[in-house]
Amino acid sequence: MNYTTPVIKKDQPDDTFKTQPLPQPIGKYPYHLHVVDIHPVTNPNQMDFHMVGDTGGTGNPEARQEIIDQMSLQYKPGSFLYHLGDLVYHYGEASQYNDQFFKPFEKYPGPIFAIAGNHDSDVNPDSKIPYQSLDAFTTVFCDSEPQHVVFSGESKRQSMTQPNIFWTLETPLATVIGLHTNVPKFGAVSAEQENWFHNELKSAPSDKMLILCLHHAPYSADTNHGSSLPMINMLENAFNTTGVRPDIVFSGHVHNYQRFHKLYADGIEVPYVVSGAGGFDELHRIATLDDSRFEPLPFPGIHLKSFCDDEHGFLQITITQTDDQLQLSGNYYSVRAGAPAMLRDVFTVHKA
């Protein structure tokens, strides 16, 4: 039988020495980007967008392309893709972006926003051309103005103008906070970023859906990573300090789909959704109860409501506003070559 709660991996190695320094911000504090500056809003009472993580890799490009093709079929005017990190493997080298990002996503109709994953942030020690962590990522996503990317081949997709590696996307119906969780297996967040995050929580508009995105999944029941105690502790400290919690949390890093719900002491339930099955050839299965490498996470009130660990897939998100509330609706689709995307999970979040 599979676990129905998050797991923690026993004897976790400490690899925080892999933490990389961050590049300088391209924009001004507090690092906000308004979606209307990039893309027209066609309906002020509804927004649609896709989410997916871990699309990089060369081992199974067919899965990645199938996901992109299916998302493109679902595309609606005014929507976009929010990428949850790990666009290229295994290091964030400029030479990998054309084959793993620009060519595959060339026909996706909308803009692509992103947070960087651990592989995007890592540096290849054997590279013949020296580079700093996130050099290529910032060239693609954190430019001062949209322009052709020199290592994108003949792609027509121009650079994005995200103001920083950690940043907030403002939309008419939602505030999307994007954290940068660096290179270590279980993530790392600097004190400077934590202070920024606390301020973003406190200043977030109460009349919009508050969405949090980070690459490393706080909660997981998979057999490769398990849950991340550093990310759990960082998030809970922020929520307790500010008195503010997001309405939903999205992550990648783990190569499958999982939806957890965490019930807090005040009776509020927050979904934590992992969507990291974006195309990398290795999928991560859910741990079984007899797997001696793992043990249940010793925190109450967190339950795995749904998962898909045998096929690649992506999320389609819709936020609608009525007179008295906001509703976020999520659909998770898995893909197979030559077949329509299969709906595997549906969830909703309401905010009065």
Image (spheres, rainbow, N blue to C red):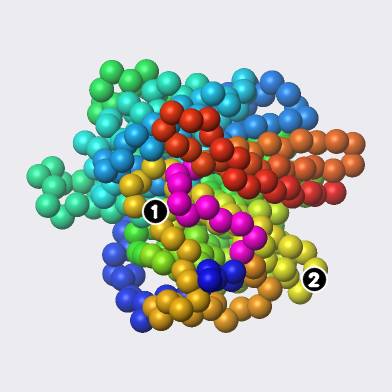
At 53% from the left and 78% from the top, the residue drawn is 296
Q: Main secondary structure of the magenta part?
A: strand
User: Where does residue 196 sit, x and y in percent of width and height?
Assistant: 55, 57
Q: Can I make out residue 299 in this image? A: yes
Q: Is residue 312 magenta?
A: yes
Q: Can I make out residue 189 in this image? A: no
Give the side of residue 147 with respect to residue 217, left or right: left
Secondary structure of the residue carrying numbered label 2: loop
Q: In the rendered structure, find residue 266 and report the number of the disc placed on it.
A: 2
Question: In the image as oriented, which residue stretches furthest toward the right?
Answer: 323
Q: For the magenta stretch, what is the residue range?
A: 304-313
Foreground: 272 or 138?
272
Relative height, residue 99 to residue 11 (above, below): above
Q: Quadrant of residue 74?
A: top right
User: Where does residue 290 sit, x and y in percent of width and height?
Assistant: 46, 78
User: Where does residue 73 sit, x and y in percent of width and height?
Assistant: 54, 23
